[in-house]
Image (cartoon, helix red, strand yellow):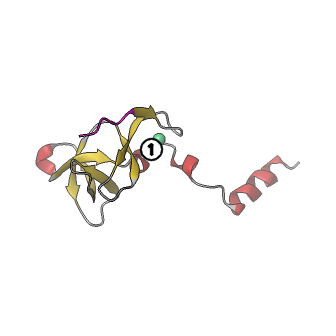
Amino acid sequence: MMDPKTTACRACGARIMFLKTAAGKTMPVNEVAVFFRKEETGKGLFVQGDGTTARGTLVDAMEQGDGFGYISHFATCTNPDFFRKPRKKDRKNIKEENEP
Ligand SMILES: [Zn+2]
């Protein structure tokens, strides 16, 4: 197992680390591993111990889930707007607010 370095999320300051998935992608995940229930339609994306990813829903306890791994930080980031590019509409609103 590799030894990923933790870092702070640029948007919210949470401790995260970058894991390389089996598909060769680098993904930001929360530092703490979690239990989850595997679901095709789940909101979360999890990196499992072997580097494969699975979609699912975060659960509180092992008994409630059937998977164990690291959740993609994008699913839990408290400031996800940081990663979105401003849309034209938003820029227009800002301009209007600043006008007398
Ligand atoms: Zn964040």
Q: Is residue 14 above or below residue 50?
A: above
Q: Which of 35/99 is in front?
A: 35
**Residue 40 in the image, given as x and y percentages of width and height:** 27, 66
Residue bearing the label numbered 1: 77
Is any atom of residue 79 visible in this view? Answer: yes
Q: Which of 5/45 is in front?
A: 5
Q: Residue furthest left?
A: 63
Does residue 35 appear left or right of residue 70 in this picture? left
**Residue 37 in the image, given as x and y percentages of width and height:** 20, 55
For disc 1, the neighbor class at 10 Å (few under 14, some 14 to 19, many from 20) is: some
Query: What secondary structure is the magenta-colored segment mainly?
Result: loop
- Residue at point 29%, 51% (across, down): 47
**Residue 49 in the image, given as x and y percentages of width and height:** 21, 47
Q: Residue furthest right?
A: 100
Residue 31, image quadrant: top left
- Looking at mark 1, is its residue's CB closer than 8 Å to ligand 1? yes
Check disc 1 and give the amino acid type.
Cys
Q: Which of 72/98 is in front?
A: 72
Q: Is residue 76 magenta?
A: no
| Residue stretch in magenta | 1-5
Is any atom of residue 14 visible in this view? Answer: no
- Residue at point 52%, 43% (across, down): 79
- Residue at point 30%, 61% (across, down): 42
Q: Which quadrant is the N terminus positioned in?
A: top left
